[in-house]
Amino acid sequence: MNKPITIAVDAMGGENSPNKTIEGISLHSKSSSEIIYNIYGNKNIIDPLISKFKIPSDRFKIFHTENKIEDTDTALGAAKKGKDTSLWLAIESLKENQSDCVVSAGNTGALFVIAKLNLQMIPNIDKPALSALWPNKTGMNIVLDLGANVECNEKNLIDFSIMGAALHKSLFEDETSKVALLNIASEELKGNTVIKNTYQKLNENKNNLFEFCGYIEGNHIMDGNVNVIVTDGFTGNIALKTAEGTANFITSELKRAMTSNILGKFSSLLNLKNLKNFKNKLDPRLYNGAILLGLSKPVIKSHGSTDAIGFANSLKVSEKVIKGRLIDKIKENINWLMRINLTKKEIVNSIYMQI
């Protein structure tokens, strides 16, 4: 029998917690029998919710603390708040190998800082990247970075390519990972110096983890021709927020049009199944669970305002990345990354010798 997967849950982070986190655990536990949940938070509040949502006693352990990090805390303030907050204890359990993964819907900045204080970076990865699922016409994209790094060099973008492709293979084992760089145009000569240098290195150095497909423009992200999209955190975050805003606008306007008069209501009844499928395609709860890549252990950020369904989906993502050996897949491809860096070093040395 395989060892069960243990997920550490910061039960107190995010809006309407711990209600949504405990209900989310309940929803996820019904579809995943191999998971144990280490729950960090106020036992006096959590116990009644455990009873309410009927979570079996052999599926969880509660680690009591009355201290938690608020959404209004700064990242530095959260780190100074103490090592007995629910978030710190959850991440520390990962460090001490008591859990296989951590999930929190709490303060994003605090999660980044406390995770970096407790966990090591994967060797030869310089910066962590925030990645998330993003629907396309044929399936799902992995998009990174979504805000962890405002500025990136070509080494960072190559790191992100490896980590994004490894994440894609962990979640979608039977698919070929196809990497593209988000750019202002598809022509090879377009873009800034960093992205052009990254293009050249990825194009010249083939590997077994992914297929490099060049550039992709923002209006083609959802076409489905590639499935791993790499960019810096500044551009990625703007693209994500724009997509979320557009999706919300479309769904709200469609709902208004379908309910504003008798004809619209009648039409919506006739197309109820199609409308439901359309709504599900744009439902952000179904893609909840951003992954902080680059650390030695999996750290998952659930959206702070999501509900129990969204939190359950972040737990599902956690389960998949553990079963898919995400961290091992990244480490296995470090040799390829080192070869690119060695090639660069040899070129620099060659130029130096000629001076």
Image (cartoon, helix red, strand yellow):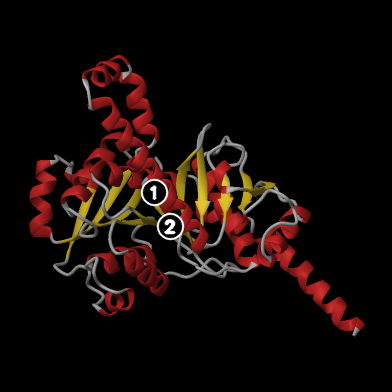
In the rendered view, does 99 fall on the left or right side of 45?
right
Residue type, numbered disc 1:
Ser
Q: Which mark is residue 44?
A: none
Residue 28 image point, x, y percent: 28, 40
What's the residue at 63%, 49% (across, down)?
A: 180
Q: Which mark is residue 298?
A: 2
Q: Residue 229, how many percent across, how many down?
A: 57, 50
Q: In the rendered image, which residue does mark 1 sit on?
A: 318
Kind of residue at disc 2: Pro
Residue for point 24% across, 38% down: 27
User: Which quadrant of the figure has residue 133?
Assistant: top left
| Mark 2 vs 1, N-terminal side | 2
The picture places residue 244, in percent across and down from the top left corner, at: 39, 47
| Apparent side of residue 29 relative to residue 95 in the rendered image (left or right) | left
Q: Relative to 29, is 157 on the left or the right?
A: right
Front-most of 269 and 120?
269
Q: Is residue 115 left or right of residue 82?
A: right
- Name the quadrant of the C terminus: bottom right
- Secondary element under disc 2, as helix, strand or loop, is loop
Looking at this rendering, what residue extends furthest in the bottom direction?
A: 355
Mark 2 and mark 1 residues within 8 Å of each other at the beta carbon: yes
Q: Residue at x 37, y 47 (%)?
A: 245
Q: CA distance from mark 2 to mark 1?
A: 8 Å
